[in-house]
Image (cartoon, grey):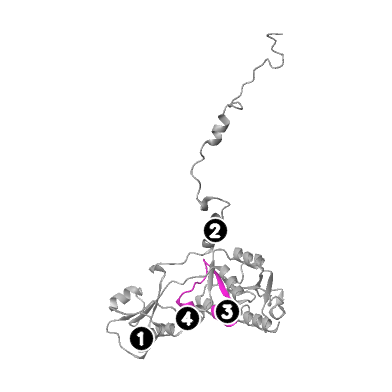
Amino acid sequence: MAGNSQRKGAIRKTSKGPTAGSGGRVKRGLEGKGPTPKAVDRPYHKAHKAKNAAERQQARKPKRRTGSSDAEWVAGRNAVVELLRTGTPVSGVYVAEGAERDGRLREAFGLAAEQGVALMEVTRGELDRLTQGAVHQGLAARIPPYEYAHPDDLLERAAELGEPALVVALDSVTDPRNLGAVVRSASGFGAHGVVIPERRAAGMTAAAWKTSAGAAARTPVAQTVNLVRQLKAYQDAGCMVVGLAAEGDVSLPDLDLADGPLVLVVGSEGQGLGRLVAETCDQLVSIPMANDLESLNAGVAASIALYAIAQARATS
């Protein structure tokens, strides 16, 4: 019946968009979508993936210290001669005008010439200023900032040599001479590097370089922001983490993990391993002692443990 609104088809349905056949849909499909993104901006393009990989690789690298404020001065004739004898990198040797030419000064000149180190003559007042008033005896040496490795580089070094990784990690060791002694032992017993925290720990200063007797030039030292996090990263990479502790559950001669990828953690003389570091270790190992001596010097303890590990690896 005409006018019956209930009749099928009587109500006209409206559409918000163009109806089929109007050409509107085709027109929208033909509209431009802007310029084509560059290859590096397309998520599935190999150039984009390569860019992301390069950024991740760059992010892994620690920021190296730069600038003259990070340089260190070694003052005094004996100190400079000993420094040059060990092969420590030196950016310049400074001698005061009119300084007495004795045997030590002549030896310093000869070593500097052999190693290609610049030799500069300055006024005594200028040398006082450079060394901040230290007793320099007319001779001082300037050491450039140390360039630390990344902790992952130590595992890569072991892989390149085809050897099971051996890394020494130091927990709150604040004496640079102990650090130098550990680096020397690590080099002598085949470790692939040493890891130290960035804060509240000794760094590779002139004292550490001297104690290492040149071993720091052969064995990389890496810095980490968080030692516990780095130890867990080493565990994820397949390394067993062993900490030296007086209350260790295993005696060093009984350690059966020496022939695999290993991280040896050494604590400070006074406090030993920190609680979180000790809890992160897979095993705590003690060095058997003949008496009730509470602890060993960190450098000595590391040397004994590294020797035992080297012997175990040689016989396995």
Q: Secondary structure at mark 1?
A: helix
Q: Is residue 3 left or right of residue 224?
A: right
**CA distance separating discs 2 and 3:** 36 Å
Mark 4 / mark 2, whichever is N-terminal: 2
- Tell me which corner region of the image, top left, top right, bottom left or bottom right, holds residue 196: bottom right
Residue 185 locus on image (x, y percent): 57, 81
Part of the protein shown in magenta: 183-210
Near mark 1 (Cα within 10 A), the count class, few <14, some 14-19 or many ≥20, is some
The question of residue 191 being in magenta is answered with yes
Which of labels 1 and 4 is toward the front?
1
Under mark 4, the amino acid is Lys
Mark 2 / mark 1, whichever is N-terminal: 2
Residue that mark 2 sits on: 50
Residue 266 locus on image (x, y percent): 60, 74
> Residue at image x 62%, y 64%?
233
> Residue at image x 58%, y 68%?
152
Mark 2 / mark 3, whichever is N-terminal: 2
Residue 282 locus on image (x, y percent): 69, 69
Residue that mark 3 sits on: 186
The question of residue 26 being in magenta is answered with no
Can see residue 292?
no
Q: Secondary structure at mark 3?
A: helix
Q: Secondary structure at mark 4?
A: helix
Can see residue 217?
yes
What numbered label is drawn on residue 210?
4
